[in-house]
Amino acid sequence: MKNLISIFILFLSLSAFAQEWTLKKNEDGIKVYTRLPEGSSLDEVRATVCVKTTLSAFTALLKDVDGYKAWAYNCVESKVIKMVCDTAQCYYTQTDLPWPVSNRDLIFRSSLKQDSTTLVIKTNSVCVPDMLAENEGIVRIRGGRSAWTLTPIAGGYVDVDYFASIDPGGTIPAWLINSTIDTGPYNTLKNVRKLLEGGKYKSTTFWFVKELGE
């Protein structure tokens, strides 16, 4: 059941009323934090890592929805539903859960914006669950948000800050979700770092992304 929980990590909700972040995992340069929002029994999660890459390469990774299965923990299906514009898209993902728990799927509308002064890139993704009909035997996630903050630093590195929050629905107890919620973000960022530092998307550029020093 441990693997079951960690996949609920692609979503963020920054609550106005929440506990302070608590460090839950610190390994191999990746830190994972959790906190409990007021009025909720489910933790929010935050994960950080430093990656030797470019802002454009990281943006390409996030825009390449078909490639999510290579790095997003337990993702077994991913596809773009609608390209809104160059900096916004709607997409579908499905997450595998061990029997007897049903797989979960979700539909996100994701947008990206870069600060013209600091060059920090921020994304925001929110659930839009009714864009597609539900699939039999798969539980549709109806409430969740996620966000990435990408901060360029000297020497060709990007500081990555990832936030997520979700209500997976169904009958999975909150204590079980919270007890292993660090596993998914840790493995996701580990996969992301490996792909990008291995040269994935290294030659990609975008008209709406400016790199440090340009």
Image (spheres, rainbow, N blue to C red):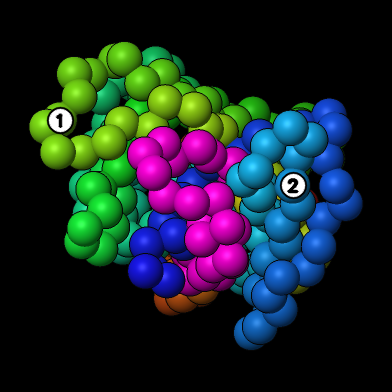
Residue at the farthest bottom position: 28
Q: Residues within 10 Å of mark 1 (few under 14, many from 20)?
A: few
Q: Could you tell me which residue is drawn at 71 percent across and 70 percent down?
A: 24
Q: Could you tell me which residue is drawn at 57 percent across and 57 percent down?
A: 175
Residue 189 seen in the current view: no
105 or 30, which lies in front?
A: 105
- Residue type highlighted by circle 2: Leu
The answer to the question of whether label 2 and label 1 lie on touching residues, with beta carbons closer than 8 A, is: no
Q: Residues within 10 Å of mark 2 (few under 14, many from 20)?
A: some
Q: Residue 209: say if magenta.
A: no
State the residue position of label 2. 36
State the residue position of label 1. 135
Give the label, 2 or 1, closer to the camera.
2
Q: Is residue 24 above or below residue 56?
A: below
The magenta stretch is 163-189
Q: Could you tell me which residue is drawn at 14 percent across and 38 percent down?
A: 137
Q: Is residue 35 above or below residue 145?
A: below
Which quadrant: the N terminus? Answer: bottom left
Residue 5 seen in the current view: yes
